[in-house]
Amino acid sequence: MSDSLSMMATTGLLGYGFGEEAFRYGLEMDLDFIAADAGSMDPGPHYLGEGVPFVSRKAIKRDIGLMLEGALEKGIPMLIGSAGGSGSAPQVALVREVVEEIAAERGYHFKMAIIHADQSKEYLHAKLKAGKIEPLGPIDDVTPHTIEETHRVVAMMGVEPFQQALKDGAQVVLAGRATDASIYSAIPLMRGYDPGLVWHLSKIVECAGAVAVPKSGQDCMIGILKPDHFLVVPAHPDVRCTRMSVAAHTLYENPSPYHLIEPDGTVVTVDSTYEQFDERTVKVAGSRFEHSNRYTVKLEGVRRAGYRTVFMAGARDPGLIAIIDDYIESCRARVRLQVAALGIGEDQYKLNVHVYGKSGTMASREPIQDAVPHEVGILAEVLADDEETSKAVMAMARLALLHSDFPGRKCISGNLAIPFSPSDIPVGQTYEFNLWHIMEIADPLEPFPIEMVDV
Amino acid sequence: MVALSELASVLRSKNAGALLCTLDLMFEDVATYERVRDSGVINPELIASLYHVSQNEVSIIPYDVAMAIKVTVPRLVPSGSFGDTDVYGSQQHGPLLTIEIPD
């Protein structure tokens, strides 16, 4: 182990961008590698379902183009995890295509590893049968039926597939779904650094500029590992990290700031100390890693939920707003009747009407029940197994919401202000998460095949 | 009594995965943080009633080093499932704003 190792996280999400000036400052800091996480499940199940990114191809190309230029200029590894957003096969393929396109345009040559994270139904059935799959939080147990109805599923890799790819000679690693921290922990762990410090640093830098002050969303972050502590500092000299910005970061998107779970154990920050090292740099020590007696990877899977059609409108009649909940119930009854006449049964669709201005944001958790807004927004959504049914139900729901009677009605030519023509918007096939579980595996490489490519 | 919205410098919500919603209450100074933490007001009973969940589904973790209290509850439905209103879980902090903290 050398006495220091430096890494740069260019961006918290590949395609969200980063400042070129910050990046170039960072490149001059004697780095051992650069990396970026490309993944998040925050945008919901659609992107894994469709296998598409939630950022534009243009934005991915810009970010990767700069990173490739820097990594090749300095002769250091470049690691991308959760390529394309959810790290599934079509998303990884898209990012690979972008990398190869840039290389062809600029005449770059390097060895690249592609690591796959999609899981086959056969593999999952075998794991289920062996009792190796369990829920991660409040979700039902997996059954063979759950696996059968899954549309697409990825597992989150740990550091081992990255390490294998690097051992096999890759300079660029393009990985499917991976834990955010594994991307940054792979190289330091290979070089023998303390796992508590390595994992904790990785958890902090993976969001890149999130710990920068002031926060511009465009900052690259530098992590420097030492044998008994680590340092975090932004790449750009005009920006700094504060003790508080770094300490607070373990709160973000985690249920606990003290215990951060990874495939082979838990990062424990209970005894971590945070110290302002200099004006721009924070020093952290005391973090521990508790090894687990089993190796688990998280599964993220989606099933098809049906075709959604949405409809938006405003209501401004005080008489209607006063009785809006009852009105919507009566409209639902009318829809039931009218679609039954089309041969569409109650079990063939779901209709939901959100009332913005009252409970659009929190639904049944909205604590304020007696608000009397002067206008409300109506958002209706229909889900059905096929698009024709979805559109047919929405057409009837729109009619009911627009033209139903209510006590004391004076606005008899229509109850809603509809902002668009067409008014009903089909948004296509939708998905929902059905796998949010952990799977125990014996070999950390087994579910993540590595493909080596000469670019 | 003072409303929590007056005392906290950050009051935010966010998904912690697709199944949980995590709420961070952060404070500018130790005195204010300790006042809220030690008031006992932020307890599982209150959070359970505000978010319509059972007490054993509520996690509350004081985090001294960042002068923060972390509260986690199950989401109403998994992120993006039918009936969801907040895919990222970013606007679920409202019920916390009006919690009254004793002087």
Image (cartoon, coloured by chain):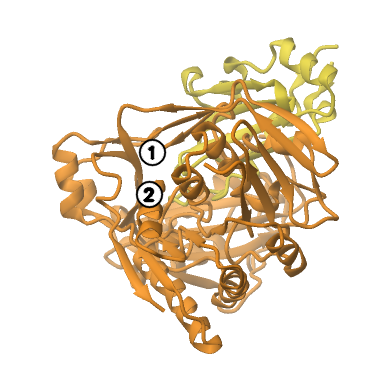
Chain colours: A orange, B yellow
In the rendered image, which quarter is residue A304 located in?
A: bottom left
Residue pointed to by mark 2? A157
In this rendered view, identify the residue nearer to me: A119 or B12.
A119
- Counting from the top left corner in percent of width and height, residue A299 is at 34, 46
Left or right: residue B18 versus residue A123 is: right
Residue pointed to by mark 1? A263
Q: Tell me which residue sits at (63%, 55%) in the image.
A: A8
Left or right: residue A251 versus residue B33 is: left
Q: Chain of mark 2?
A: A
Say what amino acid the circle numbered 2 marks.
Answer: Met
- Counting from the top left corner in percent of width and height, residue A302 is at 34, 54
Left or right: residue A28 versus residue A103 is: right
State if disc 2 and disc 1 touch (CB < 8 Å): yes
Q: Is residue A297 above or below residue B47?
A: below
In primary-sequence order, the first of circles 1 and 2 is: 2
Q: CA distance from mark 1 to mark 2?
A: 8 Å
Q: Is residue A102 visible?
A: yes
Residue B30: mark in rendering: none
Q: Chain of mark 1?
A: A
- Counting from the top left corner in percent of width and height, residue A290 is at 44, 26
